[in-house]
Image: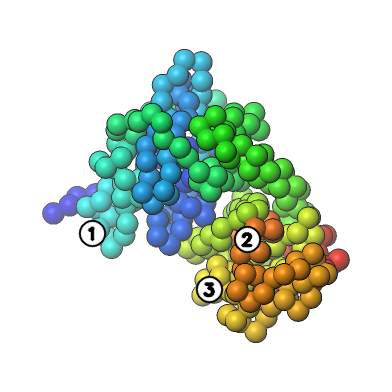
Amino acid sequence: MVQSNADEIKLVFQYGSNCSDAQINSEDRLKGDARFLSIAETVKDYELTFDVFSVNRNCAAADIVAKPGAKAWGVLYEIREYLIGRETAKAHGRKSLDAVEGEKANYEREEIDVRMPDGQIVPALTYTVIMPRTGLVTSLDYVLYIIAGLHERGIPTEYIDKIKRIAAANNPGIAAGVEALVRSMDMIRQFVPEALSDFRKVAAMADAEFIAESIIAEYLPKPHKPTGRPSGKMAVYAFFLNGQALKVGKVGTNSDARFRSQHYNPKSAGSNLARSILANPQKIGAGGVNELNVGDWIKQHTDRVNLFAPATFGEELSPSVSHHCFSHFCYERIL
């Protein structure tokens, strides 16, 4: 019989795509059970590199390797012990972090010391590559997830710039795309503080408790790929074209299709972004779009911001919460 203390918490240090809450807490990963604790850097000298091939990503994936004078930044999560190993997770009907990471196939689990911004040093589990390989090339899509996650968590800008350089050196063909990604991300980041301020105002009107730390912002710069809504979260989302909000919406815990796919398919719902664009494409410079390609046009040309909050928060507020949350920059919507 597999033994595990289900209530024991383990600290886990993530440095790659799982820095993003929407990645690690997606329905096919940990389903909301990875709780963000802090950002952190390695105590020993490590540097991020791309030295293992990921079949799922179809590109080289991230690793941290020893390098004198370098530090690797990432995210520190609290995760229940039973979710770490395959057998204990299976006993609870769950997917393990070991399975998510490809432990024993590409990565091995080890414990390292990491330092939080307040100077506290703690031991944490992490995953490093078993057999590093040279000559592997990463992709823009994969780097997008890493950089977006680092931005989302507030990792120092100097470190994000370093990751940009490492990614561009690994694959020079994505250098321009990485720069465009960061420019878009910097532009849409300015909206989040205003949206959080609006969250507070709406919460006050509804006599609902608001805890700023419970709101997670996800940035998906163009060209973006729709992500899943973390388990147990409601979401407020907005699509932007050149800094202008085209569409704003709110979904609860039972609206995954609305959140992930309906706005990209004009036939999927009576009201969505794709239908609005097709009604007047010239107004936003989308000439030539049609029912078959409008979804791809949205992904290629719009930035997306997702704000995730505890599901109970959404239940306490009115259906107009989404428009209140983006009111500062949504009053001149062009669709």
x then y, percent, for residue 55: 36, 49
Mark 3 vs mark 1, CA separation in Å: 30 Å
Q: Is residue 95 positioned above or below 113 on the image?
A: below
Dot 2 or dot 1: first in sequence order is 1
Dot 3 or dot 2: first in sequence order is 3
Q: Is residue 28 positioned above or below 42 on the image?
A: below
Instruction: List the single residue furthest toward the right.
Output: 332
Instruction: Name which residue type carries label 3.
Output: Ala
Tag 3 secondary structure: helix
Mark 2 or 1: in front is: 2
Horizontally, is 308 left or right of 324 in the view? Answer: left
- Residue where numbered disc 2 is placed: 299
Tag 2 secondary structure: helix
Residue drawn where x is 31% and y is 50% of the image:
99
x then y, percent, for residue 318: 70, 75
Dot 3 or dot 1: first in sequence order is 1
- Residue where numbered disc 3 is placed: 257
Instruction: List the single residue furthest toward the left.
Output: 1
